[in-house]
Amino acid sequence: MGLIATRRRRRSLIWVGACAVVVAATGCGAPDPTTTRTPRTTTTVRPATESARIIETVSQQRLADVLIAGLPCEDRDDYQDDLTFWDSMRGYDCVDAADTVSVRVYGSSRSVDQILPSWADALVDGRGARRGVNWFVVGPRDLISQVDPPREDPEVRSSSTSAPAPTAQQEFLTNCSQYTFDEAVRAIRGERVTETDGAYYDRAFSGVGEAVRASLDQRDLARLRAEDDEARWPSMLSERGPAWKQVCRTAMSRHDDLLRSGAED
């Protein structure tokens, strides 16, 4: 099986991880509490009412590197951000068809509770999940059992309480982030939204679409178009995520009701 065919096979297994917490229904599955094994070191996830644990991108990258260290990962996709979610993220996909392992580390501990349920459809056929406060790993149980959780963020049991609902600002940024990715994909394909949809996006996310397209020059587009497997585009575009989210925050500042709703996290 060739590389492209292999990556397309993994798409059905891990692409669900791109499902975001948005206003409209995403089609993502319900939470699945499946775990890979009895953790060697476990604590209980703090209740959602407690303050979120926030870590900077440098720490996110360090945790991602620790988590991936014990995994076979010859064919690797590097993620510098989550293009369909409000929070910052660092991670990897170790690509091997049905044996693909995905590592994700988020800036806010609440993000793991919010987004891990969207991976439920990938937890089938011997696949499971392990998690810490700011990270999770999804893949075949025999492979993810090799992950050695970092000391500063040990493995934890999933909380029995429901995931914290996103704030109004988080919801806006998730929707806007999804729009940036969708607009980038349209630029790669040489497509445009309809005039009606364009008018809606301009009102909701003022200046965002133009900023996304302006950030992708012809060399960027040529490089992306040369990659036949669209499942790789999120990782290839992920380095733009922080800048695009900043544009989304600027757009959010034009909505007084969102600014009055409180802090982003």
Image (cartoon, grey):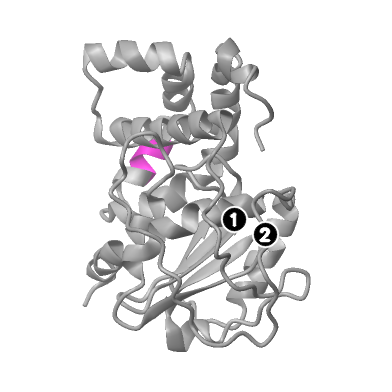
What amino acid type should be assigned to the residue bearing mark 1? Answer: Arg
Say above or below: 61 vs 38: above
Q: Are marks 2 and 1 in contact (CB under 8 Å)?
A: yes
Residue 87: x %, y % from top left: 59, 43
| Side (left or right) of 224 relative to 108 | left
* Residue situated in front as seen by the camera: 41 or 68: 41
What amino acid type should be assigned to the residue bearing mark 2? Answer: Gln
The residue identified by callout 1 is 90
How many numbered marks have been drawn onto this rendered protein structure? Answer: 2
| Side (left or right) of 164 relative to 11 | right
Magenta-colored span? 219-223
Q: Quadrant of the C terminus?
A: top right
Estimate how packed mark 1 is, as few (under 14), some (14 to 19) or many (20 or more) residues with alpha carbons within 10 Å.
many
| Residue drawn 25% across the image and 22% down it | 193
Q: Is residue 217 magenta?
A: no
The residue identified by callout 2 is 61
| Residue drawn 26% across the image and 63% down it | 12
* Residue situated in front as seen by the camera: 39 or 8: 39
Say above or below: 144 vs 207: below
* Mark sitting on residue 48: none
Say above or below: 41 vs 108: below
